[in-house]
Amino acid sequence: MRITNNMMLRSTSSNINGNKLNVNSLNNQMSSQKKIQRPSENPVIAIRALRFRSTLSEIDQYYENNIPDAESWLEVTETALKNMITIVGDIRTQCIAGANDPLTEDDRNTILTTLEKLRDQVYSEGNTDYAGRTVFTGYRTNQKLTFMEDDRTTSYNITQTLSYEDIQEYRYYGDKVTVPTTESEVLNNTISDPKQAEFDRIRLSYSEIDSITGADGTVADGTTTASTTLAYKDADGNQLGTIGVTVYDTLEDWAAANGNSYKIDETAGMQSVFIKETGELILGEKASSELRNNKASLDLNYNKTGFDKGELRPEYYFNCTDTTNPTDPIEYIKYENGKEVYQDIEYIVAANQTIKVNTQASEVFDANLGRDVDELIEAVRFAQEAYDKVTKIEEMKTMSEYSSDECQAALESWLTAAEKERDYANDNMQKLYNNYIGFCDNYLEELNLAKTEVGSKGQSLELTKNRMENQQTTVETLMSTNEDRDLSEIIIDYTSAYNAYQASLQAASKINQNTLLNYI
Amino acid sequence: MPSTFFGLTIATSGMNAYQVALNTTANNISNVQTEGYTRQQANRVASGALRVYQKYGSVGTGVTTTSITQVRNQYYDTKYWYNQSSVGLYETRLNYLQQIENYFIDDSTSKGFSTILNTMFNSLDTLKNNASDVNVRQQFIGSAQNLATYFNSVASGLGEIQSTTNDEIKSTVMNINAIAEKIATLNDQINVIEVQGGYANELRDQRAVLVDELSAIVPTEVEELPVKDSNNPDHYTGANYYTVKIGGQILVNTYEYYTLDCVARENKVNQSDIDGLYDLKWSNTGNSFHAGASSMSGTLKALFDIRDGNNGENFTGTAHVLNANQLQVTKPSMTTIEELALPEKGVLTINGRDYEYEGFTYETDADGNITSYTFDLSNPLTVQEQAKVDNRSVAVGTAVNSMGIPYYMAQMNQFLRSFATAFNDILHQGEDLNGNKTDYYAFFTGTDKVTGEEFTFDGLDSNGIAGKGSAIDSYYKLTAGNICVSGICQKAPTLLATTTSITGTGGVDAYDLIEKLATLKSDVVLYRGGTAEGFLKCMISDISIDTQESEIFSKNYANIATAIDNQRLSVSGVDEDEEALDLVKFQNAYNLSAKMISVMAEVYDRLILETGV
């Protein structure tokens, strides 16, 4: 084949260009340390890299965002539960102290004030927040668990399910002594005869109720409509029958309506009494045993306006409707088809692994706790008052204005009555103290269980965190193996490519330096 | 007995001949670096012998230069021109494919689709954990807008490429026209020279360079036939017919040449096409020149492939005449709203004839698949036309079997429509932070080019009447170019729905909808049997395979071109050593001839001055 100088030049230049391409590609590799610069150079690497990056970005999200966030949630929850345990523990201590009567009046007063203080704190832990989000309120993190101020305008319509298990025996005291203050009162006032009555009752979670709604939709408020009926059902939700209910404003009204004594007349069928002030459904014997025998429950729908500071907001415990603004009622659903609706906040902490970070108030803060403490305080106060009455009458006996024989004889009767009341009150208080030690134990058990659960979640989260850390490293390594080139390897290749390039330049400089023309 | 002075004449002929040879060499050397120059050689023959009526018969009369010709082998030219169109095709394709590829790169340095999608879904996960936090909502909305912006920028980038190719088509066509004109002129000049005897070497070189250039643009065939004297068929006149065909159609017919016109389309062929794409037509006949046809090749075909390539997925079906103004198309090739790439107004091609339509509606079956389309024609059909059209196959645009801009646009639209539909449908079930329903706006929406209003995809036309078709506010309107996150949501992040009910069973931090949205990343099949995550993988494999192929073929054809060119140069190139050798040879020959004259002078001197004096 005939070769011309130009052909040699052309092939030299194309060779130089080829070498330059190599040098350029290796230079790119060296400066980026990546195997490929564009997907088309090696689609397999490019697509695999996408997958790794996607996995890594997910792991980063778990490891760097979700897990630390979840840890904080759990920590905050655990601290709140610990505080709560301390509070309930304190209440229990007071109960034990109280149960160990006789105590001096001062001691009783101390217990009373301590209990009152603790009562204020009982639910405040439920308002704990993490970064502005209340942790015990499910999805409603923008609201607190309790009312933060005394609120006289807010009204709710609440449906509370009362189970036969909630039936408690409870003592009611009537005809309390009113200490006379003048001689004529001593002589002329009827000396009351304190009475003790024991009934089965179911206590609502709230007191100061406006009205209740019966099975037939009758709204009974004790003034315009006094009575209605309540339907009860078995565990499967089959309706079994109805119980009559009469609504009274206070216990006194109930007594007044029944000839100054607590009575439920069940001759015409099962009956009960609802006291608005205390929020109690007091059951007749028949009604009580019917509910117990059938393991029945009943849905009590009631309206309540006005809440005290520290009271639980009903939406975290019951199906209810906020009717403060009657034109725009807000409905809250806690139970759907008899099942509790859980507002679980779950964080994804690893691929296909979630962790529930929140604990709902209804799981740990028993709605009865506050009411229990209230009743205890009430009982202590009652005992205190009864004690005061006795002291007062004893004092009166020594006073000159009551020195007449008549007076003294009357005061003696007053004293007997007051002493009877004091004995009842003391007995009741002792009984409650003992009961409440048991209740506190139950509450503590619940709380401890919840705390353990949160703690063990924290531990499993720790394990997941370690695993994610490892996975992060693994994926990063895999990614690097996939797309990165070892620098030393590139340098070797680069050096040889560069040498080839230099050689081709050298060759080009020699070629065509001389032609035959130079020699003629 | 010849003339006494005959020797002088013979020597002179030698001097003349080598003078010419030396000149030719000089010409060769001077043109050693001239593009397209073919080496020339002076052809010499011994002059006709003289009968001198002597015993020894005839006497040689020296040398004659008969011609100066090019050393060129037409075979290599043909081969070169044939190969050149493939070189042009793949080189141009590679260039543009790499530009397209740039938009789909996603690595540590340039943040592409996957990175943006991952960020968006990570923000979504963060939102799941903090559903009520307005800042986190804003962050998620921002990251969703980033995704939309990414597609906007890719769409406008691809549109830019489409526009560039369109411009390049215009300049390329102008180049073809210029070449055609020049070749025709050269044909004339060459024939003028050659009909008088002789060779127009330099002009032929110029013409060959033009054909070299042309052959890279379009497949070029050249035919050169001698012009015979019609009275005397054996007599060669010296002139030649020179025909250049591009893509099988005549561009230059010796002295005549034809030009191509770029005619801007009045109607789009694909929904996402830019305005004013050119179609090529012959200026004289007005017939179309299909430079993008599958039989074509060269730079021009590459440009058309990139500009119009729809992977063979243009709209087709069977036409049925409903009435003079309406045409129904059944068995359509596009059966879902997602893949629908029909322009709102366009041209139906039936049986080679174009029928303009100004809108369409479609009918769906129980599964929501489109079973037929009804087109509203701009001009009513005559009875004859109706007969011609009925039951014929109909097409919009042509099937260009290459993955070009329209293909990638359609793919993006298809993905985005599926993704946006799934996304919006989930969010429509929800309530915003204020407890209001969010079904009155679409989260992923687009803006109407004309009115600037956001789409709600409610399936209503401008009069609020429900329907299906081009005039309806449906996902058909959503494209990669106009997708965005609803301004309603961007302005007020609280209006984003995260749950089906804020009150009732839920709360501000309820996240049931977010959980559903999260499945859209990798659990729900959205696009080409894959998930959202898989979209870029599909795109990358499409573009990479194409780019790789072009790269390989471009290299191969360039290598073949080099080989053929080398063979061509091997025959017709100027070699300096050879020319130097010629120089020595011819100089020697010239010197010898000159010496001959002085020898003859001595001979005559002896004879005339000294003999018999």
Image: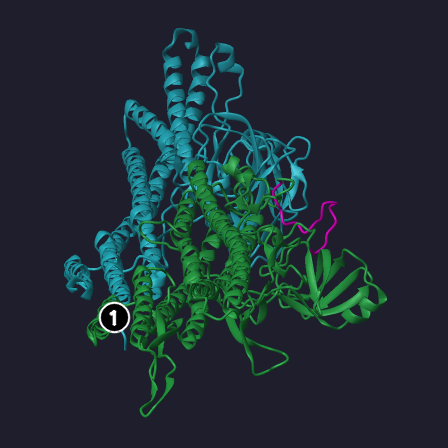
How many numbered marks have been drawn onto this rendered protein structure? 1
User: Relative to the observer, which residue lies in front, A519 or A162?
Assistant: A519
Please name the predominant secondary structure of the magenta segment in the image.
Answer: loop
In the rendering, at what x and y percent does residue A43 appear?
A: 35, 64
What residue appears at the point 49 percent right and 54 percent down from the top-left corner?
A: B516
In the rendering, at what x and y percent does residue A181 appear?
A: 47, 12
Q: Mark 1 lies on which chain?
A: B
Outermost residue on the top side: it is A400
User: Relative to the observer, which residue lies in front, A509 or A21?
Assistant: A509
What residue appears at the point 70 percent right and 51 percent down from the top-left corner?
A: B471
Q: What stretch is highlighted in magenta?
A: B453-469
Q: What residue type is labelled 1?
A: Ile
Q: Horizontal placement of B577 versus A234: left or right?
A: left
User: Relative to the observer, which residue lies in front, A434 or B398?
Assistant: B398
Outermost residue on the front side: it is B613
Q: Name the residue under label 1.
A: B597
Q: How is the image coloured?
A: by chain
Q: Horizontal placement of B38 versus A275: left or right?
A: left
Residue A236 sits inside the magenta stretch: no
What residue appears at the point 27 percent right and 36 percent down from the top-left corner?
A: A93
- Viewer can see residue B415: no
- For mark 1, does the 10 Å Cα neighbourhood hold few (<14), some (14 to 19), or many (20 or more) residues? some
Q: Horizontal placement of A383 versus A193: left or right?
A: left
Quadrant of the drawing holding the C terminus of chain B? bottom left
- Viewer can see residue B490: yes
In the figure, what tint was chain B given?
green
- Helix, strand or loop status at disc 1: helix
In the figure, what tint was chain A given?
cyan
Quadrant of the drawing holding the N terminus of chain B? bottom left
User: Relative to the observer, which residue lies in front, B487 or B130?
Assistant: B487
What residue appears at the point 22 percent right and 74 percent down from the top-left corner?
A: B603
